[in-house]
Image (cartoon, coloured by chain):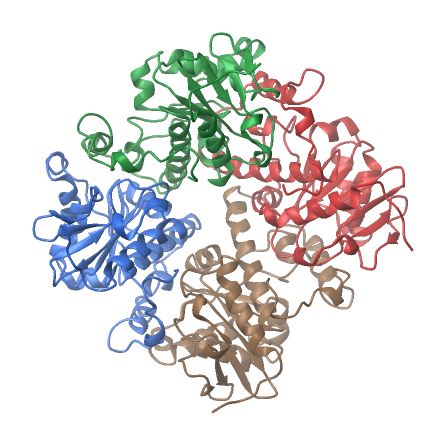
Chain colours: A brown, B blue, C red, D green
Amino acid sequence: MTLTVRDGLRQEVLAANLAIPQVGLATLTWGNVSGVDRAAGVFVIKPSGVPYDDLSLDSLVTVRLADGAVVDGDLRPSTDTETHRCLYLAFPSIGGVTHTHSTHAVAFAQARRDIPVLGTTHADTFNGPIPCTPDLTAEQCAADYEYNTGRVIVDLLKSDDRKAAEVPAALVANHGPFTWGASARKSLEHAIICEAVADIAIHTLALIPTAPPPRHLLERHYTRKHGPDAYYGNPEVTAPAPSRSW
Amino acid sequence: MTLTVRDGLRQEVLAANLAIPQVGLATLTWGNVSGVDRAAGVFVIKPSGVPYDDLSLDSLVTVRLADGAVVDGDLRPSTDTETHRCLYLAFPSIGGVTHTHSTHAVAFAQARRDIPVLGTTHADTFNGPIPCTPDLTAEQCAADYEYNTGRVIVDLLKSDDRKAAEVPAALVANHGPFTWGASARKSLEHAIICEAVADIAIHTLALIPTAPPPRHLLERHYTRKHGPDAYYGNPEVTAPAPSRSW
Amino acid sequence: MTLTVRDGLRQEVLAANLAIPQVGLATLTWGNVSGVDRAAGVFVIKPSGVPYDDLSLDSLVTVRLADGAVVDGDLRPSTDTETHRCLYLAFPSIGGVTHTHSTHAVAFAQARRDIPVLGTTHADTFNGPIPCTPDLTAEQCAADYEYNTGRVIVDLLKSDDRKAAEVPAALVANHGPFTWGASARKSLEHAIICEAVADIAIHTLALIPTAPPPRHLLERHYTRKHGPDAYYGNPEVTAPAPSRSW
Amino acid sequence: MTLTVRDGLRQEVLAANLAIPQVGLATLTWGNVSGVDRAAGVFVIKPSGVPYDDLSLDSLVTVRLADGAVVDGDLRPSTDTETHRCLYLAFPSIGGVTHTHSTHAVAFAQARRDIPVLGTTHADTFNGPIPCTPDLTAEQCAADYEYNTGRVIVDLLKSDDRKAAEVPAALVANHGPFTWGASARKSLEHAIICEAVADIAIHTLALIPTAPPPRHLLERHYTRKHGPDAYYGNPEVTAPAPSRSW
């Protein structure tokens, strides 16, 4: 059975998955990216446990948003597929989701700490701390575990789509980061930034800062990149074709 | 004298040894991988002190399981050969052994601390802490030192083959990690993961987590990858030929 | 409208910007370098938000020193352009400016700590600590934010051009490092060294040194590389053409 | 004026200098290696301040052991030349010297701490802690500074050539590591290992080990690689030609 998704989606999802090891976000087969086609009611995701070197357009798996059924592809989708699906259903503005086990973001998840806003590198992308969920309960682990992994994120954000757009990342306690964005590529970019700010934050905390940054500085940085008054970037050149190298 | 081992074993052992510096697990000539042919009663291992750039199929050494005699190859085998042999003899399910001096795993070994289970990255592969042995005694160092290095691991695991399969790694106190698996390739994969979880654990401990992860979460992750109810991966694509790049 | 700048300036600015990701100083599009032509009253700078892979001579932007107007180039200049302009206006000896979000320098900026002089690696280049500015006030953030980011550096150095030449770097609180030098290439070199000494300093502070280094050692190192008695280097070979790889 | 040194020496010194940035031991032009020809009474060293990319056999400088005079080469030798010369004069068994500013070894030097023997990775090469010198006095900095930098190392080792052979590395307080060995290549290898053990030691100390390793283990590791009972390596294959890649 074959199903047509919008032009470029499969190429973008493939490129984003291939970029994960290139940018140093994952060991072995850890980490996966998906992208959604809301009109077709499906999303495209990495197959489970396949080495990045073996990925091709043909090995990607297409999954139905409504019930998680595989509608295209010969392989089993990522075990984290239900987490992606839960996030897509809860947050209508999301076009892509990335999950990695990147070192410093996982360290915060394992310490069950939010990544605090310690400077403009963080505030340029995330309008607040990257929050860490509470533990999943034994019941949440026993049945529909992967869907419930998305559920604790959705609950943490109180199902607020605007909040999800302003802080497009969360840490699942004792597990690791999930990030999202308007596209698969954007969700990957947020995963890269989440890891970078976690890395800097660990070094910062070791140097014992005495007080949080002033709120007006952080707001300035967020608003110069986001919203109606944004003036960062050259829009026509910052959206390269999905197949190019990152 | 030439001896035939099962098809692909020498290629797999060569590829796994060549991968050690590529994945950043060893400096200079440190680190070695072996693979066993139980039917032939021998294992194939890296020669001692040879730079990775000079390794070839011809330089590998074949050693008899029963007594450690070299039965094929012109070079002296790794000084750690007797440690590998001890592990093969104690644990019948092992098909390959890897030893490295990877930075973060050695730090735990030098601090004589187990690598604790701090999250799902660890639990996906290791069903419990990666244990650190007690010190070798002066007697254990004086004679059969390398065999005794295997012995302290075997004693730590109480010669339990199932335990060895569930936690395929140990740290020798003040020395470093030994890992094993169903094949040479798998033992290398466990060495990569052992180093990755040690790296994340050091960062996590610096962030001072307040409590261990819930047991139900860790069990869920281990069992979704291992045992009768495993549902991670696509078996037909996750066992690539040994000669391909990792 | 086209404007001619002195020979080699555009090539040097392009090469220095392309070097930023190569030397590991920036993630994604973070970081920018500019170079000035005092005679023409302009400086050349990276366009805003453009990936390093897409940079070319044609995408660089030329900005007027006097008022910040774009006088050549089709793209919007870096959002940090006004900070560069402020530094050029305050310090006549500066020929180039670099801004990055390099990990360890940003950690010091986020901890609002000067990078202390802990050894000769630092003293070889910087004749004193790399200072961290105070917080920008709400007023400084509300209007002319980027120009004021340069202003807090200029105020910190009391507009002293000689001081700027002796310590060609500063950290903006909760933001990151700005470095400068006699040329674009030199400002980049100082960014590389600023990050290296920040990295070493964090490890040093973790080892708890008990006292500062002796002043006579530090002075010796600074003066053997700088000033009338300098004897480090072979001048004829240490100024390679700007287009070569770093 | 041209002077003939023993076959292969210049090639070995060039290869060892080129390896410094490749193995990640130095930033920019920091770091230098030399090799000695005792029969000719000279040593060959890197020129001062020349980027590694520009090094060639022709740019190397030959210096007379007796008085430090340049006897061959058009460029000025490394500023650290007198330190190398001091070490060659004090320790007759030395064939090569390496100096770097590698991150973790410099951190120990800046903290003025010896790198302690925390495990077998260290004991495999160094038969004791890598010692850190006291501060140079103001007098030692004022005149013959670089020669005195060698002097504090020689004094620390009490001019003991056997001690220098057993622990072929020292840290100059607030400066960085100097290493040496039977050849230029061996001195570089010791610089690589010095940095690796410093890196592991910093992580180990952060994990708070409770007691030093047992002496019998460390002795066993040192003696299996060094001295009359050494059984590590395959001598015929561990001394590759100096011009090959490391």
The image quadrant of residue B190 is: bottom left
Q: Is residue B102 visible?
A: no
Q: Is residue D78 left or right of residue A134?
A: right
Give the number of marks: 0
Q: Who's the residue at 51% across and 75% down the image? A: A155
Spot occupied by residue C135 in the image (x, y as percentages of width and height): 70, 44
Q: Is residue C244 left or right of residue D166?
A: right
Spot occupied by residue D68 in the image (x, y as percentages of width and height): 52, 11
Spot occupied by residue A12 in the image (x, y as percentages of width and height): 58, 73
Q: Who's the residue at 41% across and 76% down the image? A: A146
Q: Quadrant of the C terminus of chain A?
A: bottom right
Classify B54 as above or below D212: below
Q: Who's the residue at 60% across and 66% down the image? A: A167
Q: Is residue C44 left or right of residue C115?
A: right
Classify D115 as above or below B209: above
Classify A88 as above or below C150: below
